[in-house]
Amino acid sequence: MGKLGNLKDGGRTPIYRYADKNSETIADLQYNCAVLIELGLLEKGINYQWLPVGLPNKNQIGYVDAGQIELQSVKIKNVTDSADRNQIIQDAVSYIGLKFVRHGKSLKTGIDCSNFVCQIYRRTGIKIDHTPNGIKKQGRKVTDEEALPGDIVYYDVNHGGGHVGIYLGNGLIVNSAGHEGKIYPEGGVRICRLQYNDREEYECYRII
């Protein structure tokens, strides 16, 4: 999880091609956004000053300075007593690294925020709208304390455009975000904290 920066500009933590600050920067990690650590490489004795991270869209491993990030474990399997909610979470995180495409609808080539939520829900047999505001209208508003893994998080509360993600629990979401052409971890399907980059205001909604 990116530790340096702020919500306004998102911060920037470089990810290097090798465990060396003199090597090429191949990606940037934003403040309060996550990359997945390659635990298998850690177990092989990689220097803990550098953490190996998977970059699916680049089909390679990069390295980030351990002092620039905060480690946070994420439980994926059996996070609730609901089989549907567990399936939603497992399906959603299985697409980490998928490219963000504005108005995109493909779980193979690229997708936007609301189509991602819509299709993940529909894989569990739950039909919901494919627009942020439509998804919001279908749900029942709940408090942060009431929110459960699998609920919807709606952003841009006072601006009308809308952005949505799926709540993972423990203050985290998985969502497809970023401007056209941005790939993981700067964009695409990724895990973030509830407040990240310039997304500060949000509401939680329950559909199931």
Image (cartoon, rainbow, N blue to C red):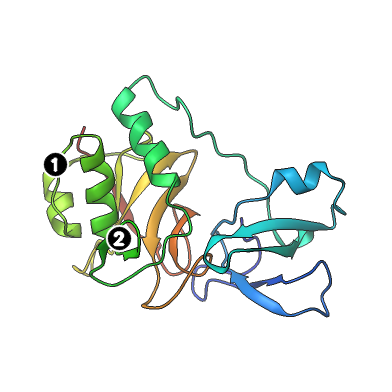
Q: What residue type is labelled 1?
A: Lys
Residue with the mark numbered 1: 127
Residue 1 placement, left or right of 170:
right
Q: Which amino acid does label 2 sit on?
A: Cys
User: Is residue 82 positioned above or below 29 on the image?
Assistant: above
Tags 2 and 1 touching, CB below 8 Å: no
Task: Judge the density around disc 2: few (<14), some (14-19), many (≥20) Cα neighbours within 10 Å.
Answer: many
> In this view of the protein, can residue 109 be seen by the observer?
yes
User: Is residue 73 positioned above or below 175 on the image?
Assistant: above
Q: Which residue is drawn at 79% across and 46% down?
A: 42
Q: Position of residue 138 (x, y in %)?
A: 12, 44
Residue with the mark numbered 2: 113
Residue 163 placement, left or right of 176:
left
Say what secondary structure mark 1 lies in: loop
Q: Which residue is drawn at 61% across and 73% down?
A: 27
Quarter of the view holding residue 109: bottom left
Q: Position of residue 113 (x, y in %)?
A: 30, 60
Residue 100 placement, left or right of 56:
left
Q: Where is residue 182 in the image (x, y as percent from the top left)?
A: 45, 75
Q: Which of 6 and 29 is in front in this view?
A: 29
Q: Residue at x 48, y 68 (%)?
A: 197
Q: In which quarter of the image is the N terminus?
A: bottom right
Residue 204 placement, left or right of 199:
left
